[in-house]
Every structure is written in structure tokens, then in C-alpha cells.
């Protein structure tokens, strides 16, 4: 395996800000029927030629709602009374599900099999409406179910308030209760509950991420706004690391590594590197990527935005040459270590936009896992390298749909897409899509 470093990473563009809420109606109450589901997970209803978004509802239900106002061209409402319930409605696991303002668990009231169908529907809607894929050309495979729908989050980030208290990110201003959260692994909740710091001790820390590895080891990751480490006196059996303002990690206590099992293979992830929080699903997702690539022993494959090498680990035993690219140095170091056993793997550090023009070989297939969609430069680079099969791993159906349109300009046509439930009981839609170059 060889390691190369030809460039510096580029910063992703910022997403546009949401518009303000406009009070068009003074808290009027209306009875509506939920016709569909929106990308954010709320139900969609129609009222006086307006589209209304109603959280905690299911298509087919009749609900009395209180109108809150208009935002981004949509009327917002809150449910007041359930008039006619769906057969797919179940009792949420979290006691404060309807009042905690949590952004994550908005679908706990929907039976799990119905969630899988809704995620497939949401993926289809984005590809048809935003991606402009003709309906007769769209092939969707059934949603891949999660290995476990509860207590699957192995890393979660808490905000640090001005007075040093911790709270989960929520839709409302009130702190989100975490002690009864049904999605977060109990070891993370226990670590946060045991975190006892003096007022002012977390000055210069904007967030605390708590991580749990496959071996059960817990790490606190302090996301800092200053380079000076806080003076913490903690009696916890955890590792503590800090990510400095320049995005480099610094060790304070214990290990710098989180251990992740990918089937029978163990991977390392240095403090500050990203991996998907649903550890039980990583092997399933990686195997799906490998199968979708339809690999041959003679294939030459690209793994772009490769992270700690999760997909490369699944691909490497089945191809003749694998080229991995990522821009974050600690992640590249992890991948270099994780893929050490494979002599036919090249590990390259640098932004994908800068690395692709420097590659001279042609490639049979590629997997991309971008954080914020693909740039035109990357699409052009894939076409120049004659990549015939492209597997696109996405955590955002709208970004995937936008790139479907753009990839067609470079000869890539969507063959099929499949939702993968990496975030059960939420409206987040992860997917794996196959493109073929014509």
C-alpha cells in the first residue's frame, strides 16, 4: 500500500439559511387530512389552497391542527387532536416524544415497517421531483431495514450553553431531555449524566461529542473555540480528546482511538474523524456498496471521500487495484492503518477535486460518499477516467437528486437506488444508488 499527499482540502460551501416565520393566521384551528409526507418527516395537508406541514402525523390521518404561520412558502401547524388515526400509529418509546423538540426521533409514532415504506416513498419523490428522473425509468429497490431500531446511536453531540450546561440540539428553545432517549446508546447517556464539571470549566468549548466504540470504550470529544485545554477534574473511565479550531485533534486523557468492528474486521477511528453513528449498520451498508459495484477480480476502483476506509475495507479483497482519496489527514492516517494488509491499495491525501486530475489510469468503478454533494469538477474527473460504474452513497436524498440531474450531463444515468435505514425512527433517508455511464 502506498500513501500520497498532493494537495490541501477545500472548505464546503455553506447551506442557505432558513427564512423567518410569518404570522399570516392568528392561531386559527382547522381540521385537515394528511395526504403525504414531507422530506423533513412532517405530514402534508391542504387547507384553503395552502400546503400545511403537521409534525407527528401519518398519511391518511385526519387531524385538528393549530396554524402557526408561514415559513419558506409552507404553512406550519401543530397537531391539536387526532380525529382519525392510521393503523400504522404506535406508542412512542420516549416519554417526551411529542414535547421534547428533538430533531431526531420525529417518527417514533410510526410502525417500523411503515417507516421503511415511507423512506422509499421519500427517496422516490426526491428523484422524480428534483432529479427529474422519468417515472418509467426509475427503479427503486426495497429499503434495507436496520439491524436494531433502538439505542443504535454510538456518537451524539451535545451543545454547551453559556453557563456550561449540556443540551441536545432541538427544534425549540427548550433543552431536549436525553435521559429517556430511545435512540442513543445507554452508555453515552450514562457518561453525560456522570459528567460533573464546575461552572465555567467548559469555557471555550462549543460542543461535546460522546462516542462509544464496538468494544464498549467511551470517549469525550471536546470541540473547542480556543487552543487552551479546559481544566477538567473528571472521575470517569473515559478517554478525553479535543478538536482545536484548526480541526486538528489533541489528546487529553486516555486513548485517541475509537475501535469499530466491520464484521470480523477491526477498524480504528482517530478522535475528530467522522464515521456514521449507527455502528450496527456499518457492515450492512458496506456490503451493500460492494454488491452494488458488481466487482470483478480485474477491476480498478476508486473510493472517494473514503473516511477511515470503511468501504475500501469491503472492496479491497475483491479487486486488482483500489485508490482511496480523502482530505482530512487523521482520517487518511486511519485508512492507511486499516488497509495496511492490502498491497494493491493506494491511499492518497488531498481534496478529490485536486487529486482526480492527477490520476492517469482508467477505472472500472468508483464509490463516492460526499458530505455535500459532488462538484462539477469531480463529475468531469470521473468521466475523464472512464469510470463505468458509479455507486453514490448519500445521507441526503435532496442532494442525491440534484446530482442525478448534473451527472446526466457527463453521461451517467441512474440505474437504481435503494434506501438504507441508518437512522430508524427518524425521517433521515440514507441511500445507495448505482449510475452507469452510457
Image (spheres, helix red, strand yellow):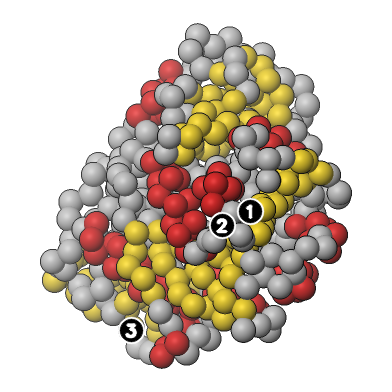
Distance between the alpha carbons at the discs numbered 2 and 3: 58 Å
Q: Which residue is mark 1?
A: 320
Q: Is residue 287 left or right of residue 323?
A: left
Tag 2–tag 1 contact (CB < 8 Å): yes
Distance between the alpha carbons at the discs numbered 2 and 1: 6 Å
Q: Which residue is mark 3?
A: 47
Indicate the secondary structure of the residue bearing disc 3. strand
Whether residue 419 is visible here, answered yes or no, is: yes
Whether residue 80 is visible here, answered yes or no, is: no
Of the 4 image quadrants, the one containing the C terminus is bottom right
Q: Is residue 347 left or right of residue 235?
A: right
Residue under the point 47% across and 22% down: 217
Q: Residues within 10 Å of mark 2 (few under 14, many from 20)?
A: few
Q: Which residue is mark 2?
A: 297
Q: Which mark is residue 175?
A: none
Q: In the rendered image of this protein, does residue 235 appear above or below residue 334?
A: above
Indicate the secondary structure of the residue bearing disc 1. loop
Residue under the point 75% across and 33% down: 248
Identify the image quadrant of residue 19: bottom right
Q: State the image coordinates of residue 75 (x, y, percent, origin top left).
A: 43, 75
Q: Nearer the viewer, residue 295 or 107?
A: 295
Q: Residues within 10 Å of mark 1 (few under 14, many from 20)?
A: some
Amino acid at each position: 500500500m502506498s500513501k500520497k499527499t498532493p494537495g490541501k482540502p477545500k472548505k464546503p460551501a455553506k447551506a442557505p439559511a432558513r427564512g423567518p416565520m410569518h404570522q399570516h393566521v392568528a392561531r386559527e384551528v382547522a381540521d385537515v387530512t394528511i395526504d403525504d409526507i414531507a422530506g423533513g418527516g412532517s405530514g402534508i395537508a391542504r387547507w384553503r389552497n395552502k400546503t400545511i406541514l403537521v409534525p407527528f402525523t401519518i398519511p391518511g390521518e385526519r387531524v385538528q391542527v393549530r396554524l402557526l404561520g408561514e415559513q419558506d412558502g409552507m404553512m406550519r401547524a401543530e397537531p391539536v387532536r387526532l380525529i382519525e388515526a392510521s393503523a400504522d400509529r404506535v406508542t412512542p418509546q420516549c416519554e417526551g416524544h411529542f414535547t421534547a423538540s428533538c430533531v431526531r426521533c420525529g417518527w417514533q409514532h410510526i410502525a417500523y415497517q411503515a417507516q421503511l415504506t415511507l423512506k422509499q416513498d421519500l427517496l422516490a419523490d426526491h428523484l422524480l421531483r428534483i432529479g427529474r428522473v422519468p417515472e418509467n425509468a426509475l427503479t427503486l429497490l426495497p429499503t434495507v431495514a436496520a439491524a436494531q431500531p433502538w439505542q443504535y446511536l454510538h456518537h451524539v453531540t451535545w451543545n454547551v450553553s453559556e453557563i456550561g450546561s449540556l443540551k441536545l440540539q432541538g427544534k425549540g428553545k427548550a433543552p431536549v431531555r436525553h435521559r429517556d432517549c430511545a435512540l442513543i446508546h445507554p452508555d453515552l447517556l450514562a457518561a453525560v449524566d456522570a459528567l460533573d464539571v464546575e461552572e465555567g470549566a467548559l469555557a471555550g468549548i462549543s460542543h461535546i461529542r460522546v462516542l462509544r466504540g464496538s468494544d464498549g470504550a467511551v470517549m469525550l470529544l471536546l470541540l473547542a473555540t480556543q487552543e487552551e485545554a479546559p481544566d477538567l477534574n473528571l472521575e470517569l473511565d473515559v478517554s478525553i480528546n479535543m478538536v482545536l479550531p484548526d480541526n486538528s485533534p489533541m489528546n487529553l486523557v486516555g486513548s485517541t482511538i475509537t475501535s469499530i468492528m466491520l464484521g470480523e474486521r477491526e477498524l480504528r477511528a482517530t478522535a475528530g474523524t467522522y464515521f456514521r453513528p449507527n455502528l450496527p449498520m456499518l457492515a450492512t451498508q458496506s456490503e451493500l456498496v460492494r454488491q452494488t459495484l458488481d466487482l470483478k477480480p480485474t477491476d480498478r476502483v476508486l473510493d472517494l471521500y473514503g473516511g477511515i476506509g470503511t468501504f475500501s475495507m469491503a472492496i479491497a479483497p475483491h479487486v486488482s487495484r483500489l485508490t482511496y482519496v480523502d482530505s482530512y489527514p487523521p482520517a487518511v492516517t486511519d485508512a492507511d492503518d486499516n488497509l495496511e494488509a492490502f498491497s494493491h491499495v493506494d491511499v492518497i491525501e488531498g481534496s478529490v477535486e485536486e487529486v482526480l486530475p492527477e490520476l492517469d489510469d482508467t477505472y472500472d468503478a468508483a464509490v463516492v460518499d460526499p458530505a455535500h454533494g459532488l462538484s462539477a469538477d469531480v463529475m468531469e474527473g470521473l468521466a475523464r477516467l472512464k469510470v463505468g460504474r458509479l455507486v453514490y452513497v448519500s445521507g441526503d436524498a435532496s442532494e442525491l437528486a440534484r446530482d442525478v440531474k448534473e451527472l446526466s450531463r457527463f453521461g451517467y444515468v441512474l440505474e437504481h437506488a435503494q434506501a438504507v435505514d441508518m437512522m430508524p425512527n427518524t425521517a433521515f433517508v440514507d441511500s445507495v444508488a448505482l449510475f452507469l455511464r452510457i
